[in-house]
Amino acid sequence: MYRPRLIPVLLLSAGRLVKTSKFSSPRYVGDPINAVRIFNDKEVDELVLLDIDAGRTGVEPDYALLEEIVSEAFIPITYGGGIKSLAQARRIHSLGIERISVNSAAMQDLGLVRELSDELGASAVVGSLDIKRTRFHGELLFDSARGKTLRKRWEVHVRELVAGGVGEILLQCVDRDGTRRGLDLDQIEKVVQVSDVPVIAAGGLASLDDMQQGIKAGAAAVAGGAFFVYHGKHDAVLIQYPPLSALGA
Amino acid sequence: MIGIVYSGLGNVAAVANILRRVGADSVFVSAPADLSGIDALVLPGVGAFDAGMTALSNSNLVEPIRDHANQGKPVLGICLGMQLLSAGSSEGTLPGLGLIDAHFERFDPAESRVPYIGWNDVHVTNQADWFGQEIDPRFYFTHSYYAQKCADSVEVLATAENGFDYVCAYRTGNVMGVQFHPEKSHRYGYDFFTSFVEWTCTDPA
């Protein structure tokens, strides 16, 4: 039976695992190799690893770290951060990471999306998109690499990503990131309506009830960060993932 | 020794990692000479059908893989690798390896999820204990095409449901293919590869 996926998103920064709040103030939460091993043992549906430095500074992905992270992870993994070429994607792929997420590079070069999709297959390419609510201009695309909102309409960008051949969209609602305030259901619905491919919704996840609401809003999968690494009111670091029985299997 | 076909495409290290986890050594096979001393082949694959066949033929591996299979040595195709073992797919125009008499077709969005990305229950139809001790094996899938036509010579090992039941694991003699990713399916994968290693280490004679 098909069951929507619940996906932890892990942020990498300088070889460490961090958690942001509204896309800023990264806080150290642990060692990524150890964390991924724990998530593997908890038999997560899938993991998304995002290198928040590689996108911003333009440095190469940390291949050695990724290789070490995945050498003991027998679960589906998506990597994003700093992918600008097919050669980089191939190399990530060969390490044992089957899905590549593109974000900043796809804003400038949709040819890259086409190239990746043609060679790796659509289901191996995830189009990542960050949306921020603004006071005067409604919901805008957010370029996390440069830390600013863009003029380009997110609707246009979603359609371009889909036309370019991405197999899924990863939607991150910037204002909910790290807040555990619940998903932005309204935004999820809007993106699902525009996208012809499945949408993974992230930002604000705090409970399995939130997840169900996200699925009801049309998401094919729900992702989160803080939900999986923080525990309690004071954000104590604790890696957790619900058992299969709680996920309705 | 188990060889993992690497023609420049695919998540090959993931297969090597899980084989190591279940205690088996492996090497990558990127050229015909690499096949010497190989007892069993794994053909992983992610990507489009024609890109996969083109990569194999650019590495001059098409005939050597067929020879290996025709000598009765085990071959396991995973995901696209399963599809490449067949006669062909409507995703591409190139013929497949033709080791299994089947043809792949795209799921119809009117009745199925396309692409199907996620976990699914696998219904084991064969008595052979391919899937270890798990009563309800689950595996991770990511695909848009499925084995629509299978000749009578094809032994169906397992089916899965995506709007209807389709063949997700098949075999003809020493050649088998699975649509799911056992290398990405944690304990179900450990069980599967344990069976595979046992199979490849058993002298058929």
Image (cartoon, rainbow, N blue to C red):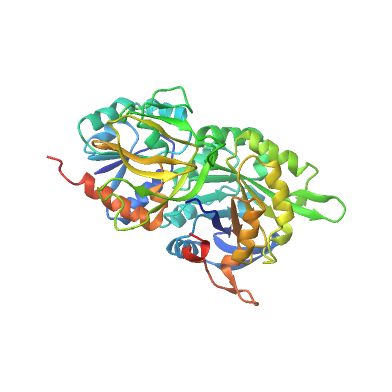
Rendering quarter of residue A110: top right
Q: Position of residue A5 (x, y in %)?
A: 54, 54
**How many numbered circles does the render carry?**
0
Rendering quarter of residue B135: bottom left
Q: Position of residue B11 (x, y in %)?
A: 43, 43
The residue depicted at 28 percent of the width and 49 percent of the height is: B130
Is B205 situated above or below A53? above
Residue A150 visible in rendering:
yes
Is B58 situated above or below A99? above
The residue depicted at 66 percent of the width and 50 percent of the height is: A171
The residue depicted at 25 percent of the width and 40 percent of the height is: B40
The residue positioned farthest toward the left in the image shown? B205
Relative to B105, A54 lies left or right? right
Relative to B25, A67 lies left or right? right
Rendering quarter of residue A12: bottom right
Q: Position of residue A175 (x, y in %)?
A: 74, 59
Front in this rendered view, residue A131 or A16: A131
The residue depicted at 63 percent of the width and 51 percent of the height is: A219
Front in this rendered view, residue A116 or B137: B137
Is A50 situated above or below B173? below
Q: Position of residue B86 (x, y in %)?
A: 36, 30
Residue A13 visible in rendering:
no
In which quadrant of the rendered image does the C terminus of chain B lie? top left
In which quadrant of the rendered image does the N terminus of chain B lie? top left
